[in-house]
Image (cartoon, coloured by chain):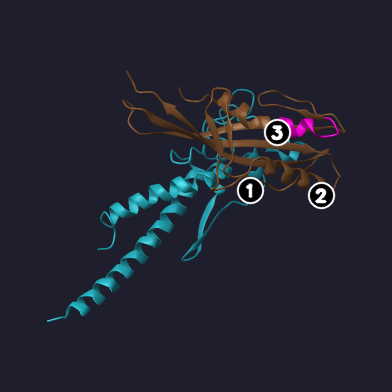
Amino acid sequence: MSSASERNDAHNRRTVVQLGAMMHDHFVGCVDEAFRSVDEGSEITGAAGQPVGQYGPGYHPGKVGGYLKASWQKVFVSRDSAIIGTNTDYAESIEDGLSYAHGGTPMTLRSTEGGFHSVKTTVAGMGKIRDVVAERVKREHGEGGAR
Amino acid sequence: MSATRKEIQFALRRPLLDYLDAQPMTIAAAWEGKRFPREAGVQYVADQLVPSGASLVGHARIVGRTTLDGLYLIQWYGLPNTGLELGDTADEVVALYQAGTSFVTSEGNAVQIKREPAPWSGQVRPVDGASVVTITVPYQCVTLVPAAA
């Protein structure tokens, strides 16, 4: 029969392990949501996502884009760090809505989905992402987490 | 009634207008939605409001609050080949929007500059005939919502 002290020790060990798992799930969930926000758009952050879809009249009508959207990558470089990025050269132009290749002139959005400023909007909305993912992780691990 | 985007944008633009007025040289403003043919030797400033979401705090049948989040973007077209000058200008513009500062709109609503993240300026990008920098100001506007009938 275990003593109260031993039961406390076992409980503390379980708590530490479960909290570690919850923190890891929270981090991975935040990266996933941030990537979705930048690439697909998000109802959490309000980001539009990368432009894609059929172009309208006057600009390759009927042609479907998607090169930039498909180029965004999410890479976990360690247990607690990740990179979301793209090497597409016009990604910064799409982000800022300015054509850096044409004197920085404002761009016209011609795609049926997505828009500009998705990275900035995601960065500004990371607090909301953290809150939403934290609630999700709490539900998945049982309300209140470790017991 | 919830704040309108024009009301929010005008409140956030006011410190920028005061800053432009205080400059010794002419800086042309190219406000949102209007095309601007750039002239050589003239700096331009453009702004945009990028709303990014709204949430109701409290119940619609009692007095609640609506929070409107978004970004106020300032894009400054400086003169070419002026070294670090545009970076200094960007820092001065960011300083106009201290994190936590509130601006009152024409309708009496408060627009607060967010702390997390606080405003920041991006890289100065050389382009044909100019250098461009984007300054990002995250904001939150809180308005009281009267009880629904």
- The numbered mark 3 sits on a residue in which chain? B
Q: Which residue lies under the disc numbered 3?
A: B16
Identified by mark 3, the residue type is Leu
Instruction: Please check the rendered image and state whether residue B92 is part of the magenta-colored stretch, yes or no.
Output: no
Which residues are the magenta region?
B16-26
Q: Which residue lies under the disc numbered 1?
A: A88
Disc number lying in front (3 or 2): 3
For marks 3 and 2, give the CA distance: 20 Å
- The numbered mark 1 sits on a residue in which chain? A
Counting from the top left corner in percent of width and height, residue B53 is at 47, 34
- Regarding residue A107, the answer to whether it shows in the image is no
Chain ID for brown: B
SS assignment at label 2:
loop
Label annotation for residue B84: 2
Where A88 sits versus A22, above or below? above
**Marks 1 and 2 close (CB-CB < 8 Å):** no
Q: Which of marks 3 and 2 is nearer the N terminus?
A: 3
For marks 1 and 2, give the CA distance: 27 Å
Give the residue drawn at x 64%, y 29%: A108
- The numbered mark 2 sits on a residue in which chain? B
Looking at this view, name the residue that lies furthest to the top: B149
In this image, B15 relative to B142: left or right? Answer: right
